[in-house]
Amino acid sequence: MINIFEVNETNKMVEQENLDVRTITIGISLLDCMDSDLDTLNKNIYKKITTVAKDLVKVGKEIERDYCIPIVNKRISVTPIAIVGSSACKSPEDYVTIAHTLDDCAKELGINFIGGYSALVSKGMTTYDEYLIRSIPQALAETDFVCSSVNLGSTRCGINMDAVRLMGEIVKETAEFTKENDSLGCAKLVVFCNAPDDNPFMAGAFHGVTEADAIINVGVSGPGVVKTALEKVRGESFEVLCETIKKTAFKVTRVGQLVAKEASKKLGIPFGIIDLSLAPTPAIGDSVAGILEEIGLEHAGAPGTTAALALLNDQVKKGGIMASSYVGGLSGAFIPVSEDQGMIDAVTAGALTLEKLEAMTCVCSVGLDMIAVPGKTSAATISGIIADEMAIGMINQKTTAVRLIPVIGKDVGETVEFGGLLGYAPVMPVNEFSCEAFVSRKGRIPAPVHSFKN
Amino acid sequence: MENKNSKTIITVVGKDTVGIIAKICTYLSNNHVNVLDISQTIVSGFFNMMMIVDLTTSDKPFDEVQKELTQIGEEIGVDIKCQRAEIFEMMHRI
């Protein structure tokens, strides 16, 4: 039988160490909503989402109450809208109407985000994909809860450089459209290489076409729990360090598994996956950088950071995989800058640069995330940064992503405030040498060789 | 009702005082809640108790018991939590 020490340990994780379930995300297929008439399409989408997810918030609150575990976000992901709108939308403006419909659904249901305003263009772009991509700046400026993502490359297909070039411009344009709010629109826009179909985390969540009609995906989080566990093994060997992370990750993930199964039962929607993640928030003690410091680094970004992060990421997976029956999504330690107080401190102290962050993304989930850069950064430079990150994903057979915020009107040394879970960030310097001629080339980077791994 | 098939864990944390267990047990007995196990320690001067109870025999739904216990806790100045046991079983048992 359960004893008092185990009960106290669990409750301490929640009360003092910020253990929470970061999100319950319902993935909903909108393929059966498709119609060639735009009004009918919008009506179908609204009806389907508000029907399938009508109890999401209520059930989330019930689970919070029954187990006394906070569920921070309730979210929805949908089939990439580029596909859903393909026969009805004849212009970028037509796509914007769908963004409004999604936003209305989010408001009606009281959820935190709705993802899937997306296009998958890893090899080529159709006309309707391009319409959707070109509509992103307006769509994100005019809506509150809609998140957008674009998959630009994959290990199987290579990198679509035409789309990379276009996305550099779209990121800049999105920043311009939302310049009154410190270019907040860019915080809701992410580009991917090897985007997973079942990711519950925003801004990149969408419900892949390989998925069932509706599924429940859950993301757990507990950097604070891992950090506290590691405080007890200071100075111990790597063996002890790794065992501690594994055991803690197991416990954290078990909570996610319980919540996912319970939500699935109550909502009558099948359980999809648990995303084994260490997702930080700006709250004190809820930091992935804090774990790296506990492992033995003065700041995230110091020499040894990539190795420490690789170790952390791998142990989290090893512990988490046994704790859950199905694992998927992005699964790994997230290293967003603005959402993690330790990362913000590291940037402010001069310990962490964009280049070091890029190296770190080679060994963890997910990519260059929530990084504020000067508003004057050119579209070509942003495309160049995106291309670099996509290449890391393509060659290493992993998911990589870029969520940069070129803050219009701000420069290095200034700070931007996004609020809530998105936090705040110091504007980071970007290498200003030109890559214009490189990104101006047309076409795509071919798929890589899958042998001769060196 | 829907939540009643499992065991429930009640934890009490706060400053030690006369009659904490009595108050809670009286409430539970009045509402036909069966107590399966009790353990108690004092951690750095703080009263710390855990009860495993079975709500299947009670007429009250889980959320009402939870609400009323929280109220009793407020009255006697301790923190009373009422949680379904699966979260602990999942985390601490393979």
Image (cartoon, coloured by chain):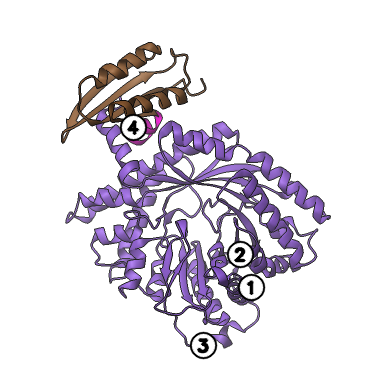
Chain colours: A purple, B brown
Assess whether mark 4 and mark 3 are in contact (beta carbons under 8 angstroms). Answer: no
Q: Circle 2 marks a residue in which chain?
A: A
Give how far across and how far down residue A359 sits, in percent.
Answer: 39, 71
Q: Which amino acid does label 2 sit on?
A: Val
Q: Nearer the viewer, residue A43 or A152?
A: A43
State left or right for residue B80 relative to residue A22.
left
Residue that mark 2 sits on: A150
Sort mark 4 into few (<14), some (14-19) or many (20+) by Cα contacts within 10 Å. Answer: few
Q: In this view, does A370 lie to the left or right of A179?
A: left
Quarter of the figure with the N terminus of chain A: top left
| SS category of the residue bearing label 2 | strand
Mark 1 vs mark 4, CA separation in Å: 49 Å
Give the chain of mark 4: B
Residue beneath disc 4: B93
Q: Counting residues from the N terminus, which is met first, the one under dot 3 or under dot 1? A: 1
Lateral position of residue A188 relative to residue A318, left or right: right
Callout 2 environment at 10 Å: few (<14), some (14 to 19), or many (20+)? Answer: many
Q: Is circle 2 on the same chain as circle 1?
A: yes
To which quarter of the image does residue B37 belong?
A: top left
Which residue is located at x 39 percent, y 33 percent? Answer: B87
Q: Mark 1 points at which residue?
A: A163
Q: Contact, CB < 8 Å: mark 3 with mark 1?
A: no
How many numbered marks does the figure carry? Answer: 4
**Amino acid found under the numbered disc labelled 1:** Ala
- Residue A242 is situated, as x and y percent measured from the top left of the image, at 27, 52
Q: What residue type is labelled 4?
A: Arg
Q: Label 3 amino acid?
A: Ser
The residues colored magenta run B86-94
| Residue A34 appears in the figure | no
Quadrant in the rendering for residue A212: top right
Q: Gap between marks 3 and 4, in whole Å?
A: 56 Å
